[in-house]
Image (spheres, rainbow, N blue to C red):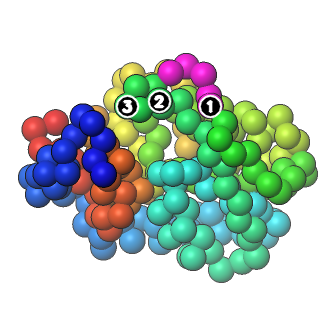
């Protein structure tokens, strides 16, 4: 059921009117490049890939399938978003189940926007004794509003400062499942 601010009809209309920024083929090629870079950086380690739920589910899965070395998988669920508005405090819904101490950790998320959530997760991994912590995002949003000086170690694609969805990123909770990346028309 669509949330109270958006009807299902509106959700469908937004997708129908959206502007495609990257095709499924371009997304796949970006994930291939990311996997090659990750392999060069940590393929010889015993890494733990941490998927950031919910948006990181799609890119983490796709990246994970492309890694041709031993790697373990876990997840975290942390957010600053309560509905559609971000707050300053990180809300933990689930922490990793595997110990991080002494591990090489790769945190994978869908998008680097302001960077506060990802920065908080990376700091947590370091506090838990991870030997090395890397970050990977499918999309980096280009703007001057970043509240963090965080730079992702591995970036697949860059987008303008627009409302984007697909490949794990959502429009009011919908369209994470699209294989391409879209921007809301007129945004």
Name the residue tied to disc 2.
82
- Callout 3 touching callout 2 (CB < 8 Å): no
Residue located at (37% from left, 39% from top): 141
Left or right, 144 with respect to 43, comes to left
Real-space Cα distance between discs 1 and 3?
A: 14 Å
- Callout 1 touching callout 3 (CB < 8 Å): no
Q: Image quarter for residue 40?
A: bottom right
Circle 1 Cα neighbour tier, 10 Å, few/some/many (<14 / 14–19 / ≥20): some
Residue located at (54% from left, 68% from top): 61
Residue located at (62% from left, 63% from top): 38
Secondary structure found at label 2:
strand
Compared to residue 25, the image places residue 115 above or below, namely above
Q: Earlier in the sequence, mark 1 or mark 2?
A: 2
Secondary structure found at label 3:
loop
Is residue 81 rendered magenta in the image?
no
Q: Earlier in the sequence, mark 1 or mark 3?
A: 3
Residue stretch rendered in magenta on the structure? 87-91
Name the residue tied to disc 1.
91
Secondary structure found at label 1:
strand
The numbered dot on residue 84 is: 3
Circle 2 Cα neighbour tier, 10 Å, few/some/many (<14 / 14–19 / ≥20): few
**Residue 26 position within the rendered picture, expressed as x and y whole percent measured from the top left:** 31, 67
- Callout 1 touching callout 2 (CB < 8 Å): yes
**Residue 53 position within the rendered picture, expressed as x and y whole percent measured from the top left:** 56, 51
Residue located at (71% from left, 65% from top): 73
Main SS, magenta region, reads strand
């Amino acid at each position: 059921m669509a949330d109270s601010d958006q009807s299902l009809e509106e959700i469908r209309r937004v997708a129908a009117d959206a502007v495609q920024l990257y095709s499924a083929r371009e997304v796949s090629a970006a994930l291939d490049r990311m996997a090659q870079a990750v392999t060069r950086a940590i393929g010889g380690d015993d890494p733990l890939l941490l998927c950031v739920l919910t948006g990181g589910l799609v890119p983490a899965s796709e990246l994970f399938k492309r890694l041709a070395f031993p790697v373990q998988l876990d997840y975290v669920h942390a957010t600053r978003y309560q509905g559609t508005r971000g707050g300053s405090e990180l809300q933990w819904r689930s922490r990793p189940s595997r110990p991080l101490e002494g591990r090489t950790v790769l945190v994978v998320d869908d998008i680097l926007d302001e960077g506060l959530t990802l920065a908080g997760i990376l700091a947590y991994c370091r506090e838990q004794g991870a030997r090395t912590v890397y970050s990977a995002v499918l999309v980096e949003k280009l703007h001057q509003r970043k509240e963090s000086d965080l730079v992702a170690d591995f970036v697949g694609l860059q987008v303008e400062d627009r409302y984007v969805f697909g490949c794990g990123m959502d429009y009011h909770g919908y369209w994470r499942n699209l294989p391409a990346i879209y921007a809301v028309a007129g945004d």
